[in-house]
Image: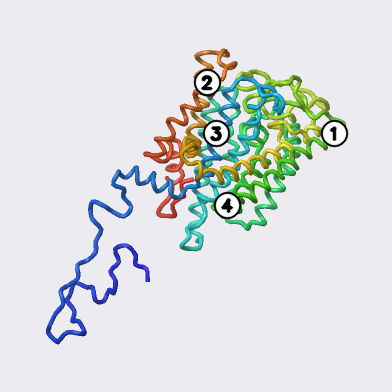
Amino acid sequence: MTQLYGERPHSRQSRATPTKHPSRCAGEMTAPRARSTPSPLRSPDRSPDGPSHARASANRATRLDGLDLARGLAVLGMVVAHLGPPHPGFDWTRPESWSAVVDGRSAVLFALCAGVSLTLMTRSRPEGAPGAADLVVHRRRVLVRAVALFVLGSLLIALNTPVQVILPTYAGCFVATIPLLRARTRTVAAIAATALVIGPVCTAIGRSLLHDADDPIVHGVLLGAYPGIPWWGVVLVGLLVGRLPLRRTRLHLVLLAGGITAAVVGYGGGVLARAALGLPPGTASPSGSASAGSAGGSEPASGTTSGAGAVGGLPDAGPHLVPKGGGTLEHPGIDWAGLTSVQPHAGSTPEVLGALGVAVAVLALSLVVARPAGALLAPVRAVGALALTVYAAHIVVHAALDAVAGDRWHTEWRAALLVIVGAGLLATPWRRWLGAGPLERLVRRTSRSLDGPGPRSRPH
């Protein structure tokens, strides 16, 4: 039988009182056996390099490198979208437009990884079945984490950059996911599919009816650039993916095939639907991943998206906010044609499904290559491990550049490249020696602040 650390075998014969050996004559006593105690200088959970290094090593041992890699790619993609210069809509034949591939899709990958992380953080330990007390603790931690993310997102919004901050939508999705943390897989899948199909319709109707509402919850979580219902569907898909055995290579290939299929069905279906309705397919997003400068229409008026340099105009709420027909700025109608758009941040079912397929495929590829290309991709994985910190930092950098340089920096790649390189150089040693990033550690401690003794969240 396997011994536990510090447990003495044959407890009856290892007590301090001496016992007679059965093979020896009466009266001959055996010497008492010395107790096995851990050294005061080296405990089993302590590293010789110090407690911080021990915690960092433990975290790395339990993390999925592929998930960190995918999350790092998502954050760096948003850095390109927000800090890079304006670019044309994505076109394979125009190399200058290739950076547009990150528009919208990076944020969807970020949300997918958030759903996977929720599962990994809240699943029960391998040695026992989940108990009611554990579930209550996990739900409370997710709720507190959501509040912390909403507060942080509100602070970033207060910097008044043109970047549409995704954290308030994250917070809303986390709260909505709490009842489903331990729900049956079939139930979660049905709700996710419903959110992805019905959510865009609800968003379009809501933007028409509540266009003049001042409530930040309405515009920041439900109807903004990242509309809550369809994005909740993305998080739920991540919740389902997190329940899979993500260390199996065969599953990685299945996820890759499934992601490619979903991308083809989403984007291809949207293009075919627009062709059937006699609508132009469109070549650009009205906004990229930052803020929109488009004045309306279900398709943009020009062939460029607004990178970091787009200012003014309307918030990036997708093409549904101000339809080309059926309404005005003051009283917008419902843009039914916009529900077939495949442009980034359109929020339509084809666009969300296509971007979700790309995100699943990128996650699958990340799981495949993370270990073989370990040293080469270590900086990107480190950025993924400190994703919240790097995300917040790039918005702070955006605000600082706006304050110092005005609009001049928007036309160059310098800011985006400096942030990307700087994030990798700083995140790599931080993750190696200190583990979780500053904001990750703050959110984690906040989520545990109301706890008594309970299960520990996994470091994802």
Identified by mark 4, the residue type is Thr
Identified by mark 1, the residue type is Ala
Q: How far is disc 2 from disc 3 in space, using C-alphas?
A: 15 Å
User: Residue 141: where, in percent of width, then height?
Assistant: 49, 47
Of pointers 3 and 1, the one earlier in the residue sequence: 3
Identified by mark 2, the residue type is Ala
Q: How far is disc 3 from disc 1 in space, using C-alphas?
A: 34 Å
Check disc 3 and report the residue beneath it: 75
Residue placed at 52% from the left, 55% from the top? 123
Of pointers 4 and 3, the one earlier in the residue sequence: 3
Mark 3 burial class by Cα count in 10 Å: few <14, some 14-19, many 20+: many
Of pointers 4 and 2, the one earlier in the residue sequence: 4
Q: How far is disc 4 from disc 2 in space, using C-alphas?
A: 38 Å
Whether residue 359 is visible here, answered yes or no, is yes
Q: How far is disc 2 from disc 1 in space, using C-alphas?
A: 39 Å
Q: Is residue 104 left or right of residue 368?
A: right
Q: In this view, does 360 lie to the left or right of 284?
A: left
Please, what secondary structure does the residue beneath circle 1 have?
A: helix
Residue placed at 54% from the left, 52% from the top? 247
**Nearest to the observer: residue 298 or residue 38:** 38
Mark 1 near mark 4, Cβ–Cβ under 8 Å?
no
Check disc 4 and report the residue beneath it: 249
Relative height, residue 51 to residue 204 (above, below): below
Q: How far is disc 1 from disc 4 in space, using C-alphas?
A: 39 Å
Identified by mark 3, the residue type is Val
Check disc 2 and report the residue beneath it: 415
Of pointers 1 and 4, the one earlier in the residue sequence: 4
User: Residue 29: where, in percent of width, then height?
Assistant: 14, 79
Please, what secondary structure does the residue beneath circle 4 have?
A: helix
Q: Which mark is residue 120?
A: none
Check disc 1 and report the residue beneath it: 275
